[in-house]
Image (cartoon, coloured by chain):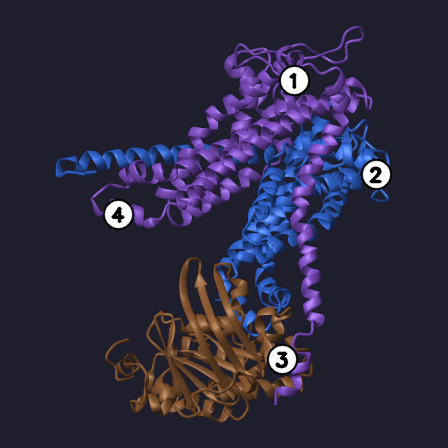
Amino acid sequence: MVNAVTTGADAKVSVRNLEIAYGDATALSGVDLDIRENEIFGVIGPANAGKTSFLKALNRMDMFNPEMKVGGDIHFSGRNTRGLRNVYALRRRIGVVFPLPVGLPMNVYDNVALAPRLGGQRNRAELDVIVERCLRRAALWDEVKDRLDTLGSLLSGGQQQRLTIARALSQQPEVLMLDEFSIAVDPVTTMRIEDVLKQLREEMTIILVTNLVQQARRLADRTAFFLDGRCVEIGVTEDLFTGEVRDQRTRDYVEGRFG
Amino acid sequence: MSRSSVTDFDRRNRDWYIDRLVQAVVFIGGISAIVFIIGIFVFITREGFSFIATEFDVSGFFLSQNWRPTSESNPTYGILALVAGTASVTGLAMLVAIPFSLGAAIFIAEFATGRVREVLKILVELLAAIPSVVWGFIGLSIMNPLIIEWFNVPVGLNVLNAGIILGLMAAPIMTSIAEDALKAVPDRYREAAEAMGATRWQVIAKVVLPAAKNGLLGAVLLGVGRGFGETMAVLMATGHSVNIPTSIFDSVRALTATIAAELGETAVGSPHYQALFTIGIFLFAITFVINLTADLIVRGIRNK
Amino acid sequence: MMFAASGQNDKDRRIQQLYFVLFGIMTLLLVLPVLIILTTLVVKGGPALSIDFLFTKPTNGMTAGGIFPALLGTIWLVLVALLFSVPLGVAAAIYLSEYAPENVFTRIINLAIINLAGVPSIVHALFGVGAFVIFFRFGTSILAASLTLGIMTLPVVIVATRESLQAVPQAFREACWNMGATRWQTIRRVVLPNAVTGILTGIILEVSRTAGETAPIMFTGAAFFLPFLPQGVLDQTMALSLHLFVVSTQVPDMPEHLPFGVALVLIGIVLIMNSVSIALRMYLRGKKKW
């Protein structure tokens, strides 16, 4: 349990008493955790544990869903995101990849160049550099470099997934959130992206929601276990796998007895 | 690396202000519809107000059939005959249009497939696009001689003529709204009935029509509203004589047509002018109620 | 409910066929008049058509000559009406599709739009007289007539635009918001580019509606006959729709082919516009971008 808990002050993302509900149905409650700068923070748990809702709350996506109610506090770089006036600026700093891949109906180049352009980047040469770098990191460059003018929305599912990752990277986010990114991607590509994520740790903080326990083990420095809308366990990832857990359910889940 | 940026974290930048500005601008567009509806009511009432305040008496206005606004000695403003004109023409139009539009809607939505369906839908759309003045012209120059010839009557501009014209005008709108209502019935209803061995017609009669009932009623109401408010076609095809009809070969005059025919000849602010605006208020109120009811009925099914 | 026992089968099939034929005939009877009317107009009005007919002024108390002033006037009226109603209608549709919360107020806006479309055209005319001609002192002018037309056809633009905006999948918006785009940036970069053809379809439809309307312009800006062409928006003008009314009801000793010619031109404009709109819509449907 060493280093499992840090003080909120030096955390990149600090969550206190987080409650999320959709209408009357509670999705997540009583979550307290801190995510440090430049770590890969894994979130594991079975379906409907509240993992995706957790990411949406960090990104303030509740603004777009009148049903979604968020309580408690989330600090980002020490700033409480509840009282933000310019939530767009927050989202610019958080890159997010949701499991359903979305290639926007514009060409591949414009897909990746969109975020820099929104940020005011007009210089074509610089955009070229950003687009190539992000597509390479997302392990998509080799497949699309000769057809950057194809519509992003017409790529295959796996390609769209990687395009979404490239787009998230193009924001140069401080925090990158991935939600079951490997669902639509083949195993080889998954491994390539995992390698990239390990390198990215030098540049940004990564929150990795995954239903693949082994993926969390390969990548995450620390991991939280969500179950039925509660955060059951937070600890150094390796400890979860070697059985140093507080809650028996964590051990059962990690060892594949349910979920 | 991100620490330095903490200072300007929540600064409202140019994009934020532009977004707010756009939101304000499009909001103006959004409320404009309300403003115009209120504006219509206010400006019509403003012009007709002193008539309502001074000369208007309910029974004289609604229950007298003497519309003699231009009489030198004793002008009277009774709209009963005009209401009867509008009602007879609209009624006949609905008699023509309702069965045909519902039949066509059922055929297009449930029987026709592929190219036939596409072509029929396009034809219905084009039918709806024909301007009312062209319909009036058709009543005047094509239907009029036909009616005189076929029925051996002296005048072909009458309830029958305008009723058919108006029916043809209202039918495409009713057809397309009714078709939408039929299409809105979920396919699983049809599949469930077909799984029980029902024929296509049984599915339609016992499942689809009952499920689409409200939408169809809404379609009929909107058709009535359209017929009721139609101006140019009834002005040109009814014969335009103040009359409570006793047969479909009588000429009549409609409320809308009266305004269209007489407004140009009245002095602004005269009692006649104001009486025409009062008819306008009446028309506005009736169509408002019809549209509101149709909307409530159609929305009723969606909320279920 | 029990359907179709085995002996019933034949009878059921015959009933079904009966209804198929019945409704098919009803549908035909509904669409047949369009074809008959068009044929009649072409046969009777066709001989009147010529380049001269389109581009010369009426002469001999309108019983001879062409329709140029009316044609030009209709173009004036339509353009000024579009200038007013397209920006307003597109803005309203963007608000309703992209910004408006689901509440009573939005519901009221939608009801107002439905009513705006449902109010009789002659009531719009009265409004135009009361508001633009008298209160705002535009007099009977193209401006007053076009504003009246624009308000009357506003629902056409709003409904078509809103539909094409809503046809853009929500997932695209969310993907864009996730990148930190503001609502407006999302609309401008993703939503509008994919809705623009649909919006154009609606605008063409509005042109067609506006060109054919008669009652709203009768007392607000269109004149039976004018010896001169309009020079600006504060002038009166002739208009094709009203011209058809005038030559078919108000002028004695009218040669038969002339009103048919006017009707043919008017309905030609309207149907061509509608066909373009329909063709554009079909092209759009065939060209899937996602």
Q: Is residue B88 left or right of residue A117?
A: left
Mark 1 Cα shell of 10 Å, populated few (<14), some (14-19), many (≥20): many
- Residue linked to disc 1: B240
Residue A250 visible in the snapshot: yes
Determine contact: label 2, label 1, CB under 8 Å: no
Farthest residue, direction top: B73
Q: CA distance from mark 1 to mark 4?
A: 54 Å
Q: Is A33 above or below relative to B225?
A: below
Residue type (three-letter) at the residue carrying disc 1 = His
Tag 2 secondary structure: loop
Which quarter shows the C terminus of chain B?
top left
Q: Amino acid at mark 3?
A: Pro
Spatial distance from mark 2 to mark 1, Cα to Cα?
A: 31 Å
Same chain for mark 2 and mark 1? The answer is no
Is circle 1 on the same chain as circle 4?
yes
Mark 1 or 4, closer to the camera: 4
Residue B136 in view of the camera: no
Among numbered discs 1 and 4, the one appearing first in the sequence: 4
User: Mark 4 — on which chain does it sit?
Assistant: B
Instruction: Tell me the residue that label 3 is attached to.
Output: A116
Numbered disc 2: what chain?
A: C
Q: Secondary structure at mark 1?
A: loop
How packed mark 4 is, by other alpha carbons closer than 10 Å (few <14, some 14-19, many 20 or more), is few
Please state which of residues B5 and C164 is positioned toward the viewer in this rendering.
B5
Callout 4 secondary element: helix
Query: In the image shown, does B24 or B198 lie closer to the viewer?
Result: B24
Query: According to the image, label 4 marks what residue?
Result: B192
Q: Is residue C147 left or right of residue A190?
A: right
